[in-house]
Image: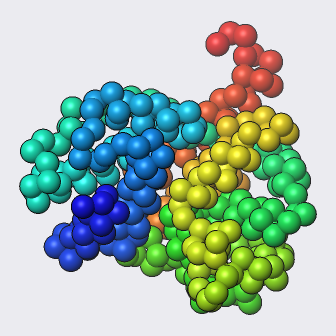
Amino acid sequence: MKIEEVMQKFLEYIEKELNYTKMTIIDYQEDLELFAKYLNNNNLNYLNLTKDNIIDYLKYLDEKKYSNKSISRFLSSLRHFYTYLVEIKLLKENIFKRIRNPKIEKKLPNYLNIVEIEDLLKVLKEDTKEDIRNKCLVELLYSTGIRVSEASNIKLEDIDMQNMTIRVLGKGRKERIAYFGDSLKELLEKYLKVRSEFLKKSEIDYLFINSIGGKLSRNSMENIFIKISQMQEIKHKLSPHTLRHTYATHLLNNGADLRSVQELLGHENLNTTEIYTHVSNERLREEYLKYHPDKNRQ
């Protein structure tokens, strides 16, 4: 049985038997498709992998500039998939259980200051339909603070241009409203004018479209950010989550209260949001050390 066929059965299993959310199923699908593509490109059989094969795949992901956090997520998806292969008796052992996750350093979120975000948006061109789409995506993630998986699943009907809001389906199927301003509205209007050029045979209702006329996936969005980071003019590390961190930090630095930021980010727990207060406090400390005449005593 081809890996694509088993993947489909696995996705049906986690949907019908485990009642996973639509967004989680999409995440699994994208992780598995990336893995299957790698196996096919390297003539590897998914039922006959060695530990060295998997280590080579992890090196491939690292070379593609995926973060350790993303690689850990990929491994989690593959462990679950291979557990399923054991359960349906295609394999006797789940080899992924022998693979450790990469170490994830606990550190403050990476974010851009106001000047850096303005410089980033100035650098991004609007020469082609892809340029306009990509710049619109960057502005959307900064303006709304939504997750990249949430951005991938935005449909045209979710956008209210008059009230400048977007209906977002977050984790656990929880719906919330994201707000945006004039900068994103202007870019959305530009993108919507060229969006039809991405479509092929049939209309689809997702906002962001890829080059073959389908929905722009989360992994494709992450790859767009990898390419942007490789631009000569870009001097800082950039990912979709960088913009989510930037959004939250800028709100708090400009006086937003923590619970409001929690709601806007779609966090279940206030503790998750509190990391951004550490970012703000660290910024204040840096300002003190830079400007206070008594700083040398510290």
| Percent position of residue 79, x then y | 25, 47
Q: How many labels does the image show?
A: 0
Whether residue 72 sits left or right of residue 134 in the image: it is left
Q: Can residue 171 be seen in this view?
A: no
User: In screen coordinates, is 49 left or right of 180?
Assistant: left
**Snapshot colouring:** rainbow
Quarter containing the N terminus: bottom left
Image height check: is 225 above or below 6?
A: above
Task: Pinpoint residue 226: horizontal percent, then vertical percent.
Answer: 66, 45
Q: Is residue 197 above or below residue 82?
A: below
Can you say which quadrant of the picture contains the C terminus?
top right
Nearest the viewer among 164 and 26 is 26
- Say whether residue 141 is visible: yes
Location of residue 102 by image quarter: top left
Q: Is 85 on the left or on the right of 170, as rendered?
A: left
Percent across and percent down for residue 124 are 84, 54
Q: Which residue is drawn at 61% across and 58% down?
A: 221
- Is residue 287 shown above or below 85? above
Q: In which quarter of the view is residue 142 placed?
A: bottom right
User: What residue sits 40% from the left and 53% below the top?
Assistant: 36
Above or below, comparing residue 88 to residue 19 in the picture? above
Say which of 207 and 86 sits in front: 86
**Could you say where residue 69 lies in the image, as x and y percent from the top left?**
44, 41
Q: Residue at the spot x=11%, y=60% of the render?
A: 88
Report the residue that reaches farthest toward the top: 297
Residue at the image point whose x is 59% and y is 86% from the top: 205
